[in-house]
Image (cartoon, rainbow, N blue to C red):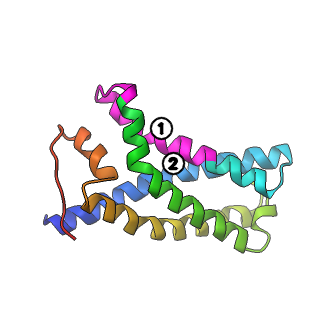
């Protein structure tokens, strides 16, 4: 596979990883907020906090399994995921706010799940070029990817 194909595949994989952490955090946050009767602002704050928590956690687990010290894994996770998760969360929450009734729908409503699926899909599209750019610069998930594959540094050209 050529470098461009590898770059695209790695960016896609990094964005799926980001989407997974964000989706877990969003769903859990919105369900908890709904169960507690919280309003939209508190619901969004909890969902965003949990999205970052799960996104970082999903990055740190393989690093810790690869015997990277926790003190090293934490800044690596922050460096590789912060921009991608930020973009994904901004887009996801804006879309949820723009879909009429989405923020008022509960986890038992089809509108909740449909809106969340649409919002996350659009957020994925927004975060993919961010991840691709970072990886092409040897940043973002490219740094974490090095630890997964024996510390070999690989940079990609756009």
Residue drawn at (13%, 66%), measured in percent from left and top? Answer: 2
Q: Is residue 49 left or right of residue 102?
A: left
Crowd band around label 1 with a 10 angstrom C-alpha radius: few (<14), some (14–19), many (20+): some
Residue position for label 1: 57
- At 48% across and 38% down in the image, what residue appears? 57
* Relative depth, front residue between 127 and 23: 127
Which is more N-terminal, label 1 or label 2?
2
- Cα distance in 3D space between marks 2 and 1: 8 Å
For the C terminus, the quadrant is bottom left
Determine if the magenta segment contains residue 52.
yes
Q: Nearer the viewer, residue 82 or 117?
A: 82
Q: Please tell me whether the stretch drawn in magenta is mainly helix, strand or loop.
A: helix
Residue lying at 35% horizontally and 35% vertically, measured from the top left: 62
Q: Which mark is residue 21?
A: 2
Find the magenta span and give its range. Answer: 49-71
Q: Is residue 114 among what the camera can see?
A: no
- Residue drawn where x is 29% and y is 25% of the image: 67
Figure quadrant of the N terminus: bottom left
Q: Residue furthest right?
A: 37
**Disc 2 vs disc 1: Cβ atoms closer than 8 Å?**
yes
Give yes or no for residue 97 being in the magenta stretch. no
- Is 122 rendered above or below residue 73? below
Coordinates of residue 84 in the picture (x, y in percent): 45, 57
Kindly indicate the quadrant of the structure image that contains residue 137: bottom left
Question: Percent from the top left, x then y, of residue 119?
Answer: 60, 67
């Amino acid at each position: 596979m050529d470098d461009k194909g590898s770059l695209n595949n790695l960016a896609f994989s990094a964005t799926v990883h980001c989407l997974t952490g964000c989706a877990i955090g969003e769903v859990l946050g919105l369900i908890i907020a709904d169960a507690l009767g919280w309003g939209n602002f508190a619901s969004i704050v909890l969902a965003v906090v949990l999205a970052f928590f799960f996104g970082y956690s999903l990055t740190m687990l393989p690093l810790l399994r690869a015997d990277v010290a926790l003190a090293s894994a934490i800044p690596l996770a922050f460096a590789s995921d912060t921009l991608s998760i930020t973009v994904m969360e901004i887009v996801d929450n804006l879309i949820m706010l723009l879909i009429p009734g989405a923020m008022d729908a509960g986890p038992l409503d089809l509108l909740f799940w449909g809106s969340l699926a649409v919002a996350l899909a659009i957020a994925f599209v927004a975060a993919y070029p961010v991840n691709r750019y970072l990886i092409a610069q040897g940043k973002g998930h490219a740094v974490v990817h090095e630890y997964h594959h024996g510390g070999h540094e690989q940079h990609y050209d756009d």
